[in-house]
Image: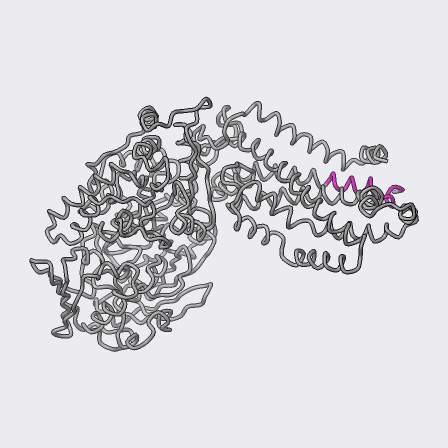
């Protein structure tokens, strides 16, 4: 089945574009660490150098003379780490809530969905800000906060898939064979409910990267880690005199978010049986 | 860039530079041919919560209310008192009585006469009971006599030479007795629609938008004010303030309300002036405070090593873009009467720093590290300068093998960590030192001021009985010469023990259109009445 999915993805131009962009960013994050191994906080050069002014700082320096290229590499690692980790948390929580609710229905479902609604009614970003502010701002709390605020859509999706699947014949057959509930959920229902979760997780990664950048922009990022949002936040005062400080990481965020969106779209096309004929 | 280079060069010259170095800036805002008429549009960094400086010393309140309600004196460029509501003052030779002659013929904005009873009432009920610093400033006043409506005599339990440094509209605002007597002063409705004696009369306050003041036609200074009125506009976003000033919607931006990085856009002297002395009265110093209760910072050699590791000159240039000067001790250079540069200084010297740490027993491990410290700052949501100073410090200390973990919580959490839980290693912030060390500086070092849970007290936990004795003696010493000597010893001890490392004296800057002029500049210009201010007509 997954070979078919892969083929579908490879036939989808948007998905290929997304994948290529993503591979490029991962390469920058990995290879960049070899080419620019320095500390991104090091005040390495004269402040406010424009890109190209000095070959030592190809992307220029910020207000305190910190090399933007080094900061960008560090930021790529942070963004990808936060994106994947918090999307993973959000998928884990979402699948658990959705699967249990959809499978057992009744009061379990009602209880879990009320909790989900509780999270859905609070604005996501505000809740993330509060969570990070209450705990100490760090990469771990950011991952945790973003994961915690972004799982409800996943839970809803998994629940609706489970509600449909649990009535199907193959499930009934498995049940008749005496399969236990956990085994039924994990081996029969979940694999069939997974495709839409993969799509939404890809989009979640994009949202998570944006949210992390927004938190850092507001000064709520990890103060010891240089992320793209940190660079933008530091540069916003000088946006009139030196737009490149905000511009370069801004473009990077745009590219990564676009990559994940394209990939998500492509996955959606590939995984949705109704769309295969198009 | 030219201002930066100028400041950078001048700051090496020493104490006298502040006035001399900025004289070019002064010349722009001072004029001698006043023009009548016009409305002045001002902005302050944050909309105030009330307009009574007598009960709340937040700067933004003072910046607005100083135009409406006056103090006994104002301060000139050199921080000497000049007459306002008091025309003359005298200290008895033993320092135990202080008498004021009050200005005659002054009326409150509602038409009632201003008399000595107003001063007596405000002193007893407001300054002594409700004013955050007034409690200590007027703590020695035991009795107030008012032999006639234009004379006030203060009797003191011990000399309090610092009172005269503190009776402007920010430190001791005179409130109308007939409005406040017998009321709950803190919740009096007039706190948001003040009645004063000043050159401008309060007209309206539209929350979230503006405060409008009109000319007081009965002002005691004949011929003033020159302006027809003042409008304080509240613009929360600093980028929007830049645009408003450029578009001519604002004439004056008070209290460093523009980012320091934007100042180069206002260097054209034909269009704008940048006043750099308005906040000298506050005498602010940015510092790095050590929690001396914790190892390894309890060892003075470790603190001295850190002092040697931080290049204040570079910090001033990078973080403050040269707007300020290097701090040399706990008393700021603008408090020229008591300032002494002749104390122990810590030149940037990484070798000496490493040597001190070795001596203290903190040798480097295989990876070149010695120990790890936390550095908390109040920058998140506040001054970007404090965040950058913390980032600078982290880099500087990494060069001597000290690893720094930055913490930037919200302001309330910051205060709780530092002053309540005392759970921190180092702290970056800035504090107003005010014109008198007894009031503004003693609180940071005095053993009795180690008060759990009270912000801006002695948060380092530093306690030195010898210094305590000197500070207490200085507080009650009526003889200026002896007092100066005591305060000099005080600065020397603090510089030796470095419970705080004083980093930079940031300058408060007021950016205005070049059309804005005043007859004289004031060291407490943030709290100037603007009776002598005018707007030149547009060319």
The answer to whether residue B476 is visible is: yes
Q: Quadrant of residue A141?
A: top right
Residue B259 higher or lower than B364, as above or below: below
In the figure, is residue B294 to the left or right of A146?
left
Image position, residue B367 (x, y; %): 46, 23
In the figure, is residue B401 to the left or right of A220?
left
Image position, residue B24 (x, y; %): 27, 43
What secondary structure is the stretch in magenta mostly built from?
helix
Report the front residue among A245 and B226: A245
Image position, residue B372 (x, y; %): 43, 33
Q: Quadrant of the N terminus of chain B?
A: top left
Q: Quadrant of residue B133?
A: bottom left
Image position, residue A121 (x, y; %): 66, 59
Task: Residue at the far left: name it.
Answer: B93
In the figure, is residue A16 to the left or right of B153?
right
Report the front residue among B357 and B259: B357
Taking the spot 44% from the left edge, 35% from the top edge, the residue there is: B404
Magenta includes A107?
Answer: no
Report the front residue among B19 and B349: B349
Taking the spot 66% from the left edge, 38% from the top edge, the residue there is: A84
Report the front residue among A54 and A264: A264
Give, as a single range, the part of the protein colored magenta: A262-277
């Amino acid at each position: 089945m997954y070979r078919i999915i892969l083929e579908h993805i490879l036939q989808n131009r948007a998905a290929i574009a997304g994948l290529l962009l993503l591979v490029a960013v991962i390469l920058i994050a990995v290879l960049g660490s070899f080419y620019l191994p320095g500390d991104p906080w090091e005040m390495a050069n004269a402040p406010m150098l424009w890109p190209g002014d000095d070959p030592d700082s190809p992307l220029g320096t910020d207000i305190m003379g910190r090399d933007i290229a080094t900061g960008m590499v560090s930021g790529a690692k942070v963004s990808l780490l936060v994106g994947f980790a918090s999307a993973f948390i959000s998928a884990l929580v979402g699948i658990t809530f959705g699967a249990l609710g959809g499978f057992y229905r009744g009061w379990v479902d009602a209880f879990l969905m009320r909790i989900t609604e509780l999270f859905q009614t609070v604005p996501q970003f505000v809740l993330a800000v509060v969570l990070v502010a209450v705990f100490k701002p760090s990469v771990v709390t950011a991952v945790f906060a973003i994961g915690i605020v972004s799982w409800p859509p996943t839970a809803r999706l998994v629940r609706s898939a489970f509600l449909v699947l649990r009535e199907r014949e193959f499930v009934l057959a498995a049940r008749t064979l005496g399969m236990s509930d956990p085994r039924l959920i994990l081996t029969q229902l979940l694999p069939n409910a997974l495709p839409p979760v993969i799509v939404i997780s890809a989009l979640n990664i994009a949202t998570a990267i944006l949210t992390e950048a927004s938190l850092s922009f507001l000064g709520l990022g990890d103060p010891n880690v240089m992320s793209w949002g940190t660079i933008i936040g530091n540069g916003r005062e000088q946006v009139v005199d030196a737009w490149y400080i905000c511009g370069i990481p801004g473009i990077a965020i745009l590219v990564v978010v676009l990559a994940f969106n394209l990939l998500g779209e492509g996955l959606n096309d590939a995984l949705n049986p109704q769309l295969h004929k198009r | 860039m030219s201002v930066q280079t100028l400041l950078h060069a001048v700051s090496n010259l020493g104490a006298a530079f502040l006035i001399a170095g900025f004289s070019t800036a002064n010349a722009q805002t001072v004029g001698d041919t006043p023009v009548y008429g016009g409305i002045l549009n001002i902005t302050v960094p944050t909309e105030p919560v009330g307009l009574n400086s007598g009960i709340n010393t937040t700067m933004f309140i003072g910046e607005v209310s100083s135009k409406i309600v006056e103090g006994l004196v104002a301060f000139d460029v050199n921080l000497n008192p000049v007459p306002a509501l008091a025309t003359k003052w005298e200290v008895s030779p033993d320092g135990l009585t202080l008498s004021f002659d009050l200005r005659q013929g002054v009326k409150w904005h509602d038409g009632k006469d201003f008399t000595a009873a107003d001063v007596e009432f405000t002193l007893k009920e407001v300054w002594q009971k409700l004013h955050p610093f007034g409690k200590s400033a007027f703590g020695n006043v035991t009795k107030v006599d008012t032999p006639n409506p234009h004379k006030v005599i203060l009797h003191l339990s011990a000399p309090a030479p610092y009172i005269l440094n503190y009776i402007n509209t920010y430190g001791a605002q005179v409130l109308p007795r007939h409005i406040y007597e017998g009321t709950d002063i803190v919740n009096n409705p007039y706190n948001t629609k003040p009645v004063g004696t000043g050159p401008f009369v309060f007209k309206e306050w539209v929350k979230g938008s503006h405060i409008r003041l009109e000319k007081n036609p009965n002002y005691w200074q004949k011929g003033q004010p020159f302006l027809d009125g003042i409008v304080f506009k509240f613009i929360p976003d600093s980028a929007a303030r830049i645009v408003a000033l450029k578009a001519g919607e604002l004439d004056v931006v008070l209290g460093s309300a523009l980012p320091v990085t934007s100042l180069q856009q206002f260097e054209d002297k034909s269009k704008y002036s940048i006043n750099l002395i308005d906040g000298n009265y506050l005498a602010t110093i940015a510092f790095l405070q050590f929690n001396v209760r914790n190892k390894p910072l309890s060892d003075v050699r470790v603190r001295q090593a850190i002092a040697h590791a931080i290049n204040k000159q570079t910090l001033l240039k990078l973080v403050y873009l040269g707007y300020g000067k290097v701090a040399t001790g706990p008393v700021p250079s603008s408090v020229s009467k008591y300032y002494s540069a002749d104390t122990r200084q810590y030149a940037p010297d990484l070798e000496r720093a490493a040597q001190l740490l070795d001596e203290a027993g903190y040798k480097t491990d295989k990876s070149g590290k010695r120990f790890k410290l936390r550095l908390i700052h109040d920058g998140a949501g506040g001054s970007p300068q404090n965040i950058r100073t913390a980032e600078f410090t982290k880099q500087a200390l990494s060069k001597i093998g000290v690893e720094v973990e930055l913490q930037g919580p919200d302001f309330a959490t910051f205060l709780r960590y530092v002053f309540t839980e005392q759970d921190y290693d180092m702290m970056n912030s800035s504090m107003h030192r005010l014109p008198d060390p007894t009031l503004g500086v003693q609180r940071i070092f005095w053993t009795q001021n180690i008060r759990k849970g009270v912000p801006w007290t002695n948060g380092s936990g530093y306690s030195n009985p010898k210094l305590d004795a000197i500070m207490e003696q200085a507080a009650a010493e009526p003889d200026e010469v002896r007092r100066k000597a005591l305060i000099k010893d005080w600065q020397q001890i603090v510089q030796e023990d470095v419970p705080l490392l004083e980093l930079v004296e940031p300058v408060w800057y007021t950016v205005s259109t070049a059309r804005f002029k005043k007859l004289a500049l004031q060291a407490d210009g943030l709290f100037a009445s603007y009776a002598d201010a005018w707007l030149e007509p547009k060319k």
